[in-house]
Image (spheres, helix red, strand yellow):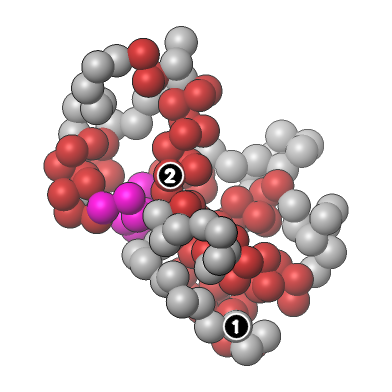
Amino acid sequence: MRLDDRDKLPSGLEEYLSMYGWHFSKKLCSWAVSHMKKDDGKKITPYTKEMVDMLLEKYGIELENKFGYDYVFAANMAKADYLGSSIPDEAHLAKFIKDYCDDPDGYPELPMSRFYADIVGKGIPVIWEDMI
């Protein structure tokens, strides 16, 4: 059952948005990443914020849209879904993070908005009060 069949936002989401906007908090990013799996069904070993910062620095990548944990979510999403396939190595992963977060056709809230659309479409509930 889709979660957008409701007339109002899920419980706790308004409070979350008042604190973080459409961006990932550390807790929400950790929760989202904890559900990520590779094609073989195995959970990924997640990148921490520090690891992503080091990766971006190593390849000389600077993000314009570096809000909260959005780029950390993007790095882990790419690791789960694309690394080793269409993203062959970490250098290209760093470029993907830049492309995803700073997409000129996108908007700064893209990572969180895409995540929200995915959980709504899949019917995955989030206890938003726990993400604050």
Label whose residue precedes the other's in the sequence (1 or 2): 1
Residue 113 tag number: 2
Which stretch is magenta?
21-28
Q: Residues within 10 Å of mark 1 (few under 14, many from 20)?
A: some
**Residue 66 point in image, percent of width and height:** 42, 71
Q: Residue at x 52, y 23 (%)?
A: 122
Q: Quadrant of residue 39?
A: top right
Q: Residue at x 55, y 66 (%)?
A: 104
Q: Is residue 34 magenta?
A: no
- Give above or below for 96 relative to 28: below
Q: Amino acid at mark 1?
A: Ile
Residue placed under numbered mark 1 in the picture: 61
Query: Image quarter for residue 10?
Result: top left
Q: Who's the residue at 72% across and 43% down the image? A: 38
Question: Residue flagged by tag 2: what amino acid is it?
Answer: Ser
Q: Is residue 73 above or below residue 1?
A: below
Q: Helix or strand or loop: what does disc 2 sit on?
A: helix
Mark 1–mark 2 distance (CA, rounded to whole Å): 23 Å
Dot 2 surroundings within 10 Å: few (below 14), some, or many (20 or more)? some
